[in-house]
Image: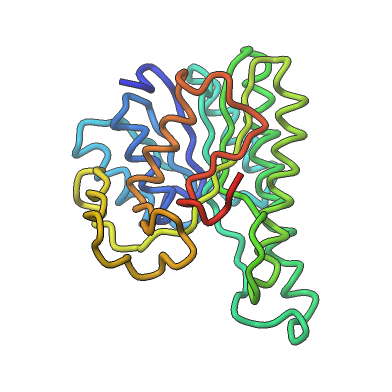
Amino acid sequence: MLLDHKTAIVYGAGGAIGSAVARAYAREGAEVHLAGRTRATLDEVARLIQRDGGTAHVAQVDVLDRAAVARHADGVAGRGGIDICFNATSNDDVQGTPLLAMPFEEFLRPVTKAVTAHFNIAVAVGQHMTRRGRGVILVMAGGREAIPRLGGSHVAWAALAGLCRQLAAEFGPHGVRVSWLLSPGSPGNDDPGQPQDGPSPAEPGSAAAPGTAGLLVRHLPSYAEVANIAVFAASDWARTITASEINFTGGAVVD
């Protein structure tokens, strides 16, 4: 298994991406700590992981509370260390409104939340990872596309990418990798009770799936596929990937 004997914290583990990543990490052998705001959703993810034979722990953590994030990370590290951190928290953005009609406070809110949350998380786990000389910090980010009516979302994602580069530069000499995952979005129809296998690719010549306009491969990754990429990024197979965007947009963003 790719993550055998690893310990991972997944922040935002009650959401669609966070829960899929947490289950994939557990499937690959990691002991997973589920952190988030809503206990009931975290408990359900833990139940699924435990049902499938994995190990999961649950904690209510407000990622905007730096002291709370640090206390939780200290507790996890005290049980044997932190190998992997995945940030899947939301940024509470407002989409669909043109910038000309958007109050500045609504524009700035996702930027402030995204940067604050990831700074708190990365510093808390980074304290322990850098001392141990190893670790991986991952987040969903990006921001290189040009799409209207996304409010502050693009600025937030771009800011996260910039923060990751700086974290990678400062943590890298201590053996810690930092990268971000860029997705075109997921169809949102994964069944959380089913095994984490991705769908079969479309047959050549078949009609494109809804929502795939602008994608070269005309396929949106399922949450399970996003999670499988997160497994690779967290594993030793990706040990030379840092300060980098892992782009699986199907060609919507061309490198």
Q: Nearer the viewer, residue 116 or 67?
A: 116
Q: Nearer the viewer, residue 233 or 211?
A: 211
Q: Is residue 204 among what the camera can see?
A: yes
Residue 39 seen in this snapshot: no
User: Does 225 sit left or right of 18 as displayed?
Assistant: left
On screen, residue 78 above or below 125: above
Q: Position of residue 2 (x, y in %)?
A: 36, 22
Image point 55% across, 53% down: which residue? 89
Quadrant where the N terminus is found in the figure? top left
In the rendered image, residue 228, in percent from the top left (x then y), is placed at: 37, 38
Which residue is painted at 60% across and 80% down in the image? 96
Position of 4 with respect to 140 (left or right) is: left
x then y, percent, for residue 116: 72, 50
Q: Quadrant of residue 111?
A: bottom right
Above or below, 178 relative to 218: above
Please state the total of marks drawn on the protein image: 0
Check the image and report above or below for 13 versus 212. Answer: above
**Seen from this angle, which residue lies furthest front?**
205
